[in-house]
């Protein structure tokens, strides 16, 4: 980061950090979480900014913060679903905090990857993998051919394999 970039970032932070924390506090209802998310927002700015000046700093910062809020909410939902699945196991499952974090991060990555594939591919993949639908049953449910089901599954499974290789 050049001196000019550093100065611009410093100015952005000093002029808008308090506003951003207040904006986030209203949405989160918690000053500590708001401060953490504001810091995450500025880290995202610092690591993702190009050299062009920011025309609408508050709009830009709030868009990034909104995205981080969505990510946080999505992660919390996935974590709660994982914990509920563990609680439903007939035998108690003892998972270390490190393994638990790794599993949740992988589940979040899979969720994000499935969203990127599009709703039809995601829905077919989940129906076959989680509900146990046969290819024929999935084709009937989604009103597509068995070949189309196979193509969607190939696409999703390929992305899962690539994700497993490069977490």
Image (cartoon, helix red, strand yellow):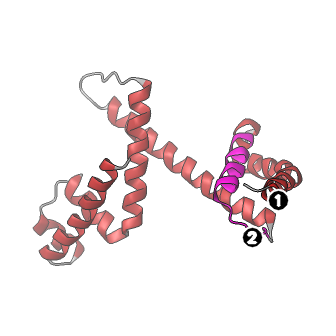
Residue 139 image point, x, y percent: 17, 72
Q: Nearer the viewer, mark 2 or mark 1?
A: 1
Would residue 157 appear left or right of 47 to someone viewing this image? left
Q: CA distance from mark 2 to mark 1?
A: 11 Å
Judge the density around disc 2: few (<14), some (14-19), many (≥20) Cα neighbours within 10 Å.
Answer: few
Residue 12 image point, x, y percent: 83, 56
Residue 140 image point, x, y percent: 16, 73
Residue at 65 percent across and 54 percent down: it is 47
Q: Which mark is residue 84?
A: none
Would residue 89 appear left or right of 97 to someone viewing this image? left
Residue at 87 percent across and 55 percent down: it is 11
Provide the residue designation for mark 1.
Answer: 4
Tell me which label, 2 or 1, sits earlier in the chain.
Answer: 1
Q: Which residues are magenta?
A: 35-54
Residue 155 image point, x, y percent: 26, 66
Judge the density around disc 1: few (<14), some (14-19), many (≥20) Cα neighbours within 10 Å.
Answer: few
Q: Does the magenta run of residues contain 115?
A: no
C-beta proximity under 8 Å, tags 2 and 1: no
Provide the residue designation for mark 2.
Answer: 52
């Amino acid at each position: 980061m050049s001196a000019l970039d550093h100065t611009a970032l410093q100015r952005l932070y000093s002029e808008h950090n308090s506003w951003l924390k207040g904006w986030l506090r209203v949405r989160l209802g918690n000053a500590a979480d708001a401060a953490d998310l504001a810091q995450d927002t500025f880290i995202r700015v610092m690591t993702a900014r190009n050299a062009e000046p920011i025309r609408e700093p508050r709009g830009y910062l709030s868009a990034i913060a909104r995205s981080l809020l969505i990510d946080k909410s999505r992660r919390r939902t996935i974590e709660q679903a994982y914990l509920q699945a563990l609680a439903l196991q007939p035998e108690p499952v003892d998972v270390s905090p490190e393994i638990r974090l790794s599993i949740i991060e992988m589940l979040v990555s899979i969720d994000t990857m499935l969203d990127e594939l599009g709703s039809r591919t995601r829905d077919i993949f989940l129906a076959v993998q989680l509900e146990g639908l046969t290819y024929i049953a999935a084709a009937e449910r989604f009103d597509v051919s068995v070949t189309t089901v196979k193509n969607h599954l190939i696409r999703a499974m390929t992305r899962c394999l690539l994700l497993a290789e490069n977490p």
